[in-house]
Image: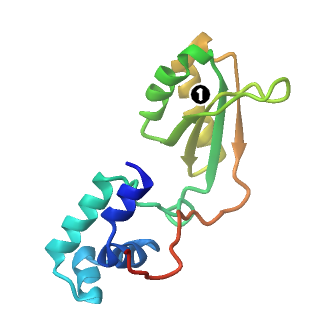
Amino acid sequence: MTPSTTQQAVDAIDRALIVATQGGLPLVARPYHAIADSLQLDPEDVMRRMRRLHEVGVIRRLGAVPNHYAIGYRANGMSVWDVPDELVDPLGEFVGAFEFVSHCYCRPRRLPQWPYNLFAMVHGKSRDEVEQQVAQIADFLGEQARSHAILYSTRILKKTGLRLAGHKTAE
């Protein structure tokens, strides 16, 4: 979608929905109904608009962002892997499917200091648990993993996407 098409797809109500949801959905049984109430809209219209905004690419995704520390996962390790570049995508698909991997992606190497091109975030209740999970990934990758390391989180950073400053009418 081109920028002009996106701008045409977003009206004042869409903008209000984006502003109302950019900090997260309300933690209630029916979050879209709560948003609809706050904006004096019909809940079905809110859901229809959110679906359309997602379909046209204005909203990339809706999902939960858990606070791992609050639910007991205190050891968070980014496992980094040196795998053949031609295999990084298929190997990443398999690694990302492990239930303990929250996200997996490839990044360029920065040789000679940084040989790693596959990254997989692993969460555990202890470093021992994270190391056991990373060992499972290593077993799966076998000889395809020439080396790997675990980089542990030392602090929590607030994760947010793009934030709109306010509510403007699209012309």
The answer to whether one can see residue 62 in this image is: no
List x then y, in percent, for residue 145: 63, 18
The answer to whether one can see residue 133 in this image is: yes
Q: Left or right: 49 with respect to 6?
A: left
List x then y, in percent, for residue 112: 85, 23
Which residue is drawn at the image coordinates 65% and 45% (left, top)?
127
Which residue corresponds to mark 1?
Answer: 135
List x then y, in percent, for residue 152: 70, 47
Question: Which sits in the foreground, 127 or 98?
Answer: 98
57 above or below 44?
above
**Residue 4, image quadrant:** bottom left
2 above or below 78?
below
Question: Which sits in the foreground, 21 or 158?
Answer: 21
Kind of residue at disc 1: Ala
Task: Give the position of the C terminus as an image quadrant.
Answer: bottom left
Q: Left or right: 77 with respect to 31?
A: right
Secondary structure, mark 1, is helix
Question: Which sits in the foreground, 30 or 11?
Answer: 11
Which residue is drawn at the image coordinates 42% and 39% (left, top)?
99
Question: Which sits in the foreground, 36 or 71?
Answer: 36
Which residue is drawn at the image coordinates 39% and 73% (left, top)?
21
Q: Which residue occupies the extreme top position in the image? A: 143
List x then y, in percent, for residue 153: 69, 52
17 above or below 148?
below
Which residue is drawn at the image coordinates 27% and 65% (left, top)?
50
Dot 1 surroundings within 10 Å: few (below 14), some, or many (20 or more)? few
